[in-house]
């Protein structure tokens, strides 16, 4: 896998997160929802440590997504979703909390693909340019953060609405300006 500016920025973000939270967060183990993020195997329902974990195998999911959308995907979004397996990662951007979306495992990546297709179809019906979401503004608002598929700019938007504003000129630039926050235990 090539090293891209997005890979480098995401690696730095994860390094800062681990430095901030040296003790791994905990999550309930689910044998039916496997992930390389689990730091140990246990019976389902037992609290175990987890960490974002580098993906080691390539996937054709983005080729299939591009074919379904009949449009090539911006390479930054492919790099972003192809770098780590993880639960969502909390962060702060310009004083505002958000969660970076990630895929927990290959099945979760397929769910993401379905959601991205739905998002793209809504954009197309509304005659708006394609964006690919990668973060949610917290706490639980209707706003989300996406990559403009043509320009590569990071934008703030609401479902079914035009882009509200540009947040960064690139995904790497956006990731470099994030401050990680501790991941809460889920037990």
Image (spheres, rainbow, N blue to C red):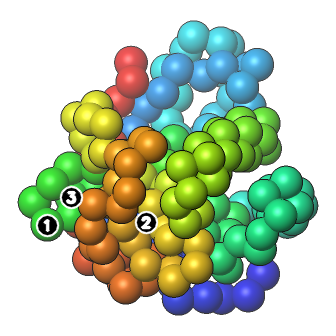
Badge 1 density bin: few <14, some 14–19, many ≥20, Cα 10 Å: few
Q: Quadrant of the N terminus?
A: bottom right
Residue for badge 3: 92
Indicate which disc residue 14 carries. 2
Q: Are discs 1 and 3 less than 8 Å apart at CB? A: yes
Q: Give me the C-alpha separation between circle 2 and circle 3.
A: 14 Å
Q: Secondary structure at mark 3?
A: strand
For image coordinates 49% across by 36% down, the residue present is 49
Q: Nearer the viewer, residue 159 or 3?
A: 159
- In the image, residue 79 lies at what x, y percent? 65, 73
Please, is residue 31 above or below residue 63 in the view?
above
Left or right, 120 with respect to 88, comes to: right
Q: Nearer the viewer, residue 40 or 18?
A: 18
Q: Give me the C-alpha separation between circle 1 and circle 3.
A: 6 Å
Question: In the displayed image of the protein, which residue is found farthest to the left?
Answer: 95
Q: Nearer the viewer, residue 70 or 56?
A: 70
Residue for badge 1: 94
Please, is residue 159 above or below residue 157 in the view?
above
Q: Nearer the viewer, mark 1 or mark 2?
A: 1
- In the image, residue 165 lies at what x, y percent? 27, 68
For image coordinates 54% across by 49% down, the residue present is 126
- In the image, residue 65 lies at what x, y percent? 80, 56
Please, is residue 180 above or below residue 88 in the view?
below
Of labels 2 and 3, earlier in sequence is 2
Left or right, 36 with respect to 69, comes to: left
Residue 81, image quadrant: bottom right
One can see residue 49 in this view: yes
């Amino acid at each position: 896998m090539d090293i891209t500016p997005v890979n480098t920025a995401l690696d730095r973000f994860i390094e800062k997160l681990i430095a901030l939270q040296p003790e791994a967060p905990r999550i309930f183990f689910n044998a039916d929802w496997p992930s390389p993020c689990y730091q140990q195997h246990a019976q389902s329902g037992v609290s175990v440590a987890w960490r974002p974990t580098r993906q080691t195998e390539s996937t054709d999911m983005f080729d299939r997504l591009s074919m379904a959308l009949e449009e090539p995907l911006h390479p930054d979004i492919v790099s972003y979703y192809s770098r780590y397996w993880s639960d969502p990662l909390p962060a702060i951007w310009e004083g505002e909390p958000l969660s970076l979306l990630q895929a927990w495992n290959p099945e979760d990546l397929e769910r993401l693909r379905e959601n991205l297709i739905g998002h793209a179809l809504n954009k197309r019906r509304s005659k708006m340019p394609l964006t690919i979401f990668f973060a949610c503004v917290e706490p639980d608002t209707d706003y989300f953060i996406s990559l403009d598929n043509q320009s590569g700019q990071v934008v703030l938007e609401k479902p079914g609405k035009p882009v509200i504003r540009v947040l960064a000129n690139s995904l790497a630039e956006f990731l470099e300006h994030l401050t990680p926050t501790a991941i809460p235990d889920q037990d």
